[in-house]
Amino acid sequence: MTQSNTSSKKSILKVEGGSPIFSYYPVTIPVAGRPVDLAMKVSAPVSGHSLPVIILSHGHGRSNFLSSLNGYAPLSNFLASQGFVVIQPTHLNSKALALPIGAEGVTFWKSRPKDIQFILDNLESILANVPGLGERVNTTNIAVIGHSLGGHTVAMLAGMEVTDPVTGEKVNFPEPRLKARVMIGVPGSPEGLNETGNKLYGNPLAGTDYSTMTLSALVINGDKDKNPNFSDLENWRADAYYHSPAPKSLLTIFDAEHIFGGISGYDASETTDENPDRVSFLCLSIIAYLRSEFDQNDTSWEDLEQELKNSSDAKGSIENK
């Protein structure tokens, strides 16, 4: 019997080990007008050249340190072991900073994309702080990944418009220097926001408009990611895909709740669906997407889509437009 090309290909979802990695932190740089210096963690493989860059934007959350440069080790360590330089800023909303709440509310939503743009503006000097790393990096291949509120930050960098509830100004930060954008568990459209969500986080979430999000992006949704503190709707966190124009991709991860198996920290109490295999699936799927975004001749994302379609026990599904 003749096997198809798809079945003879190496699985996108199998990884042969990974490189040893190191993390260097804090890299701290003063930023004009920012109440505290921008602190970052940089993780990278110990060897290799032409390494692409990922900027990882943390969420909000109730933990003191997971929503900071000290969190998301399951995600950042995996990505670094597969050949990426991962930069993790601590945004102003982090409980670790315990800053007074201003006009932007507890989320500090406008400052967050500005942090990412500052990193892009100063990328070479940031990398130069890490001994021996700067000359090993390909600074033309840069992606941003955000989880939860971090996904909201990434959406603004993809062109999503937010109406400032204080000033009425329409705000967005489209950033073409980024070759790829990934949103994990991103808040949905304001139409699906319930009364509780409006009271808690209404500042940025009630004024979002995904119809202006014109840059390419991957939206990752867990089909069990439903939280009555935000919305009563199923798959509300897939809105960024369905309510935005092409080109977009949607990865739906089956049985995933908001922490997607444990991406924000090892054995973290906030994880309600602890599952290391789910974390690995999410990471490998992101890597496939990034490879295809960085190189238009790379078929990793297409191969993954076909593999999931042909699998009897697929962990997720892909849509593209």
Image: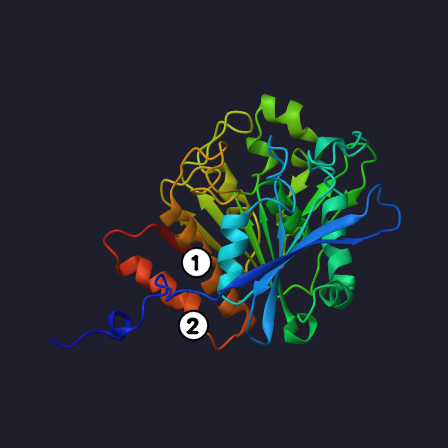
Residue sitting at x 43%, y 33%: 272
Q: Which numbered disc, 1 or 2, marks the residue closer to the eye?
A: 1
Q: In the rendering, at what x and y percent does residue 192 appear?
A: 55, 32
Label 2: element kind: loop
Whole-angstrom CA distance, mark 1 to mark 2, is 13 Å
Find out whether the residues at labels 1 and 2 contact each other: C-beta distance under 8 Å. no
Mark 1: amino acid: Ser
Label 1: element kind: helix
In the rendered structure, the answer to whether residue 24 lies left or right of residue 274 reads right
Residue sitting at x 71%, y 42%: 162
In primary-sequence order, the first of circles 1 and 2 is: 1
Q: In the rendering, at what x and y percent does residue 227 appear?
A: 49, 29
Residue 113 visible, this orientation: yes
Quarter location, residue 27: bottom right
Residue sitting at x 56%, y 68%: 46
Q: Crowdedness of circle 2 by 10 Å Cα count: few (<14), some, many (20+)?
A: some
Residue 299 circle label = 2
Mark 2: amino acid: Thr
Q: In the rendering, at what x and y percent does residue 293 appear?
A: 54, 68
Residue 182 circle label = none
Residue 285 circle label = 1
Number of marks:
2
